[in-house]
Image (cartoon, rainbow, N blue to C red):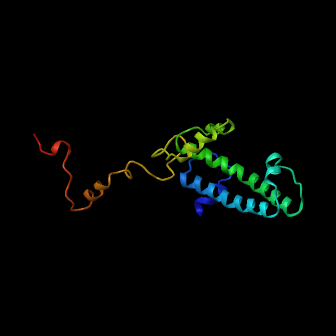
Amino acid sequence: MDYMLLPLRRYFDFSGRSQRKEYWLFVLFQWLLVLPLLGLFAATGGDFAALAASPFALQRGGANAAVMVTGWIVLVALIIPMIAVQVRRLHDQDRSGWWILLSVVPFGELPLIAMMLFDGTVGGNRFGPDPKRRDAVHRRDWRDAAVDQPGAPQRPALGGGQPR
């Protein structure tokens, strides 16, 4: 839940890096807000065809208009943190935030969504430290952990470990 709401706490923060978990949980949070609103819109007799033709048209008034206004308020409130978390995800991959402009190109959102799937660079990059706090020490092979224990046998050196 903390990662789901973290982009709201970092509302206008376009610097630094964000993990995939933060991005995708925020996307889930948005869907959890939007789907009930769409259900309410349909339950109040909302006309999806008319909404697609003119998203600002409030034909029937009443509950239907209230749901539409609520939907627009949610959309406006969440657009800045969504852009900010996307920029921070791009920073996590050591990419410029300007890559977000792909979303204004037809079908440009597809490569942008694909970029959101990739893991970030390990260790610090030009945009800040690794949000997962991974570095060379944490990336060791699991077999090295047993060797580091006191009294554990040492692994032979490369080349068989026999002196020549």
- Labels in figure, total: 0
Left or right of 143? Residue 80 is: right
Question: Do we see residue 163 in this rendering?
Answer: yes
Left or right of 94? Residue 86 is: right
Left or right of 67? Residue 139 is: left
Q: Which residue is more in the foreground, 18 or 151?
A: 18
Q: Which residue is more in the foreground, 8 or 75?
A: 75
Residue at the far top in the pictured view: 105
Rendered-image quadrant of the C terminus: top left
Residue shown at the point (16%, 44%) measured from the top left: 160
Return the x and y of residue 116 as percentages of the image width and height: 56, 46
Return the x and y of residue 149 as percentages of the image width and height: 26, 61
Residue shown at the point (80%, 59%) measured from the top left: 70
Left or right of 56? Residue 158 is: left
Residue shown at the point (74%, 53%) measured from the top left: 75
Return the x and y of residue 128 as percentages of the image width and height: 53, 45
Question: Do we see residue 6 in this rendering?
Answer: no
Rendered-image quadrant of the N terminus: bottom right
Residue 66, image quadrant: bottom right
Residue shown at the point (12%, 45%) measured from the top left: 162
